[in-house]
Structures are given as C-alpha cells and as structure tokens.
Image (tube, rainbow, N blue to C red):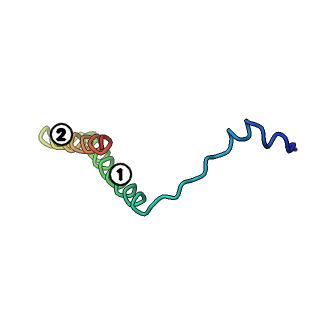
Amino acid sequence: MTSPSSVNSPLAIVNESPPRQPHSNADSESFKELSHEFRSSLNTILMSVELLEDDDTDEEECQSYLEFIRTAAEEIDRRLAE
C-alpha cells in the first residue's frame, strides 16, 4: 500500500503523465491527411516490391516499378521535410 508521503514524492510527480492538450480540428485533419499520404506512398512501395519479386517481370516493367518506388519515397521525404 502507498503511504500518503510517497504520493507527493518527486518520483511520483515525475511518473505522472503530462496533461493532454486538446487537439484542434485543424490539427486532427492535418494528421489524417498526412497519415493518408504516408499510407498511400507505403502501399505503392510495397506493391511495387511484390511485383518486382515476380519472376515474369520484364526489364521495362522493373524500371517502371522502380520509378514508382522512387517517386513514393521522394514524396515521403518531401512531407517529412515540411
């Protein structure tokens, strides 16, 4: 059982979670938009990698998939730099 004096100890204060700040609707919408863009880019990358792993993929298709991967990665990089 915790004694009343330990509740007010510095350790108890450090372990408390900081109060949560309310998020504005604009923050929430920005996060949703950014999250969607990341998921879209990651899905493009993952799909392209799967297609590259297919033994039937010819050189032209490989180059196309590599370009999809590069474009998606550049989009993620651009968004992270904002």
Query: Image point 87% across, 43% down: which residue?
Result: 3
Amino acid type, label 1? Arg
Count every numbered label the image shows and give the total. Answer: 2
Q: Quadrant of residue 13?
A: top right
Give the class, few, some or many, for how many residues have Cα within 10 Å of label 2's Cα (few <14, many ≥20): some
Give coordinates of residue 11: x percent, y percent.
73, 36
Relative to 66, 50 lies left or right: right
Q: Is residue 43 above or below residue 67?
A: below
Residue 16: x and y in percent read: 68, 44
The x and y percentages for residue 72 are: 25, 45
Earlier in the chain: of badge 1 and badge 2, it is 1
In percent of width and height, residue 75 lies at: 25, 45
Residue 31 occupies quadrant: bottom left
Identify which residue is drawn at 73% across, 36% down: 10
> 55 and 73: which one is in front?
73
* Element type at mark 1: helix
- Residue 62: which disc? 2
In this rendered view, identify the residue nearer to me: 58 or 1.
1
Quadrant location, the N terminus: top right
Alpha-carbon distance for marks 1 and 2?
22 Å
Is there any visible trace of residue 50 in the rendered image? no
What amino acid is at disc 2?
Answer: Cys
Q: Indicate the quadrant where residue 9 lies.
A: top right
Instruction: Report crowding for label 1: few under 14, some 14 to 19, many 20 or more residues within 10 A (C-alpha).
Output: few
Q: Is residue 52 visible?
A: yes
Q: Which mark is residue 30?
A: none
- Which numbered disc, 1 or 2, marks the residue closer to the eye? 1
Closer to us: 41 or 7: 7
Point 32% across, 45% down: residue: 46
Q: Residue at x 45, y 61 (%)?
A: 24
* Circle 2: element type: helix
Residue tagged 1: 39
